[in-house]
Amino acid sequence: MLYFGGNQRVRFVISGAAGFIGSHLCDRLIAEGHSVLALDNFITGSPANLAHLEGADGFEFREHDVTSPIEASAPVDFVLHLASLASPKDYLNHPIETLETGSTATRNMLELARAHRARFLLTSTSECYGDPLEHPQAESYWGNVNPVGIRSCYDESKRYAEALTMAYHRVHGLRTNIARIFNTYGPRMQLNDGRVVPAFVDQALRGEALTVFGDGKQTRSFCYVSDLVEGLYRLMFSDERYPVNLGNPDEMTILEFAEHVRKITGAAAPIRFESLPSDDPQRRRPDITKARTLLRWEPRVSLEDGLRETIAYFRGLLASSVPVRSLE
Ligand code: NAD
Ligand code: UDP
């Protein structure tokens, strides 16, 4: 077990804890013997993601919308701010909530950290680079974001959240970290949140056509969630104040990704081309030199292994016919 500032168990407050990444982070922290106050308003997250932690030693859940201030009894050692709408479909349908979570909620979580002299970590995004003109994307690149486009509610609120985090560090001396996360996937993603991994797997398992947007030549790379959690864990104990990219540099086109899904599911599903959403980034690949050097981190799980785990999870969900989520 890791102790911090004395002989006490480390106490974390996590926003967005019932989401995909948040719930895996809770698992890791509880498994290491830490204590976790988990917050979520379930706008996209699900109680099912945390059900197995109910009654676990050190784990507490509070239903709370973090756009309202949050109080926690002392001590708090770490505040991890993950709450956000995260899939393009969700943030396009809820742009104001997205902006509020990046701005007001980030301020509330920073204030909580300040009140407790706790460390703070922000989960930012590769979307800060927009539709990038530099490739691969290193942290030194300032990005190419359309400030009034349909994705701007997400991109600009995350850029604001990064700026606010740096301001709290500079003005209040808060110990902060910023993770710029690139496309991450794994069990507990929401089946119908529109992101390409659950969309293709769902379609393949149902024997439906895979919906490729545009000509499918746009690129992404996919990081398995256990690798991402390891990266976040290393980052939160580091002294790096500037953003650090966390993602998998194994870049492929969306058409190539569709082929992987077809091969691993064994589905003969056809491809159906649909129109490309505006401002959809054309090329994305993280330069992870900084994470490799500073954190000695790099992804370990192959796409094939990660997809097998993810497909098995979604197969189970489809077989159980449990309603996956209410948000549409
Ligand atoms: P997710 O939608 O599964 O989880 C987000 C969680 O935040 C959900 O449980 C949701 O209910 C909660 N939430 C949203 N607004 C809230 C509010 N106002 N109050 C309380 N809870 C609220 O998404 P995820 O993929 O797990 O993403 C987690 C974080 O990582 C987000 O900040 C996201 O921007 C960032 N990120 C994720 C990816 C990825 O590929 N998964 C990539 C880049 C950045
Ligand atoms: N995409 C697709 N079909 C889908 C969903 C997404 O072709 O059903 C494409 C989308 O246009 C983008 C890429 O897959 O180019 C990744 O989309 P996702 O929504 O997963 O995340 P993004 O990287 O855009 O935030």
Image (spheres, rainbow, N blue to C red):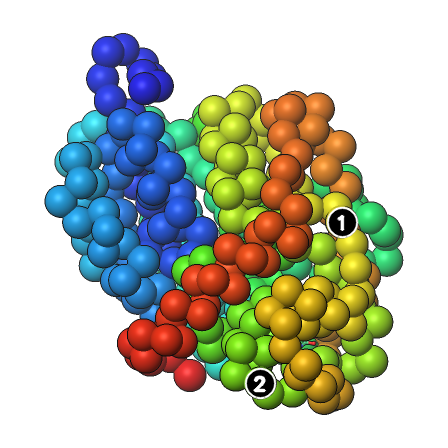
The answer to whether mark 2 is within 8 Å of ligand 2 is no
Mark identifier at residue 250: 1
- At 47% across and 32% down in the image, what residue appears? 233
Residue 161 location in percent, x, y?
52, 51
Q: Quadrant of residue 48?
A: bottom left
Amino acid of disc 1: Asp
Q: Mark 2 points at which residue?
A: 207
Q: Is residue 79 left or right of residue 71?
A: right
User: Can you name the residue that lies furthest to the top here?
Assistant: 6
User: Hey, what amino acid is under mark 2?
Assistant: Gly
The local secondary structure at tag 2 comes to loop
Ligand 2 is within 8 Å of the C-beta of the residue at disc 1: no
Q: In this view, does 122 lie above or below 290?
A: below
Helix, strand or loop at disc 1? Answer: loop
The one nearer the camera, 174 or 58, is: 58
Which label number is shown at residue 301?
A: none
Residue appearing at x 42%, y 83% in the figure: 328
Along the line of sight, the residue nearer the viewer: 240 or 135: 135
Mark 2 vs 1, N-terminal side: 2
> In the displayed image of the protein, which residue is found farthest to the front?
266
Q: x, y (%) of residue 131?
A: 77, 64
Q: Where is residue 102 in the image (x, y as percent from the top left)?
A: 47, 58
